[in-house]
Image: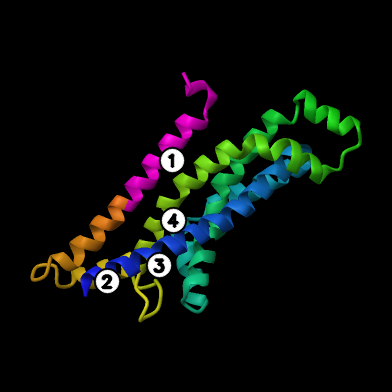
Amino acid sequence: DIWTRVWMGTRISLLIAVLAVLLDGAVGVTYGMIAGFSGGKVDFAMQRFVEILTGIPNLIIMMLLLLVMKPGIPTICIALAITGWVSMSRIVRAQVLRLKSNEYVLASKTLGTPFHRILIKDILPNTMGQIIITFMFSIPNAIFFEAFLAFIGLGVPIPMASLGTLINDGYKSALLYPSQVLLPAIVLSVLMLSFNLLGDGLRDALDPRLKN
């Protein structure tokens, strides 16, 4: 029935979105920390690569990848994450550029602390607030892109069904059975709104300038 399919589809959509955001978060954090901490020619080369990647529309990259690879949850997660890490890397890089001149980082360098240990012990904990906020705002974007791909027929294979697949199936008979398209559309909208509101709340809670 529609009730069961909507909640099963919600579970699949959330699974894909969270896995994709975790993957692009891991890549973006690592890339941004290395670029920001290294500076100089390394940072310049890494940022030029990011600019080239952002010049290509995300949907084109995702659609080409899904057409080449076998459809499934891993393929969709990779397609969503292949360009989704760029925004995370830029935010982390900006935070690292701000933090790497602090006294405790300079003290660690003076004591001969290895490169990776400074990043993990000194810089990463101080960027976690921005990382968590960006993570929460990335989930609704991933849910939307997954729903769009499913709507155009590039989603999870049958018999699995995400919210985008249910909307694609329901709009064909929307005039006779509007509930088939309205229910998954409402759940999709509520999910995206909820994560955006949660991201706003976390930003207010983790930003020291807004605590008062």
Considering only order in the chain, which callout, 3 or 4, is on the residue closer to the N terminus?
Answer: 3
Is label 3 in contact with label 1 (beta carbons under 8 Å)? no
Q: Is residue 42 left or right of residue 73?
A: right
Q: Is residue 26 magenta?
A: no
For marks 3 and 2, give the one nearer the viewer. 2
For marks 2 and 4, give the one nearer the viewer. 2
Q: Is residue 206 magenta?
A: yes
User: Disc 4 marks which residue?
Assistant: 142
| Quarter of the image where one finds residue 173 | bottom left
Mark 3 and mark 2: Cα distance apart in space? 12 Å
Is label 2 in contact with label 1 (beta carbons under 8 Å)? no
Is label 3 in contact with label 2 (beta carbons under 8 Å)? no
For label 4, the crowd category at 10 Å Cα-Cα, with few meaning under 14, some 14 to 19 and many 20 or more, is many
Disc 4 residue type (three-letter): Ala
Is label 2 in contact with label 4 (beta carbons under 8 Å)? no
Main SS of the magenta part reads helix
User: Disc 1 marks which residue?
Assistant: 199
User: Disc 3 marks which residue?
Assistant: 12
Mark 2 and mark 4: Cα distance apart in space? 23 Å
User: Disc 2 marks which residue?
Assistant: 4
Q: Residue at x 15, y 65 (%)?
A: 179
Residue 12, position as x, y percentages in the image: 40, 67
Mark 4 and mark 3: Cα distance apart in space? 12 Å
For marks 4 and 3, give the one nearer the viewer. 3
Helix, strand or loop status at disc 3: helix
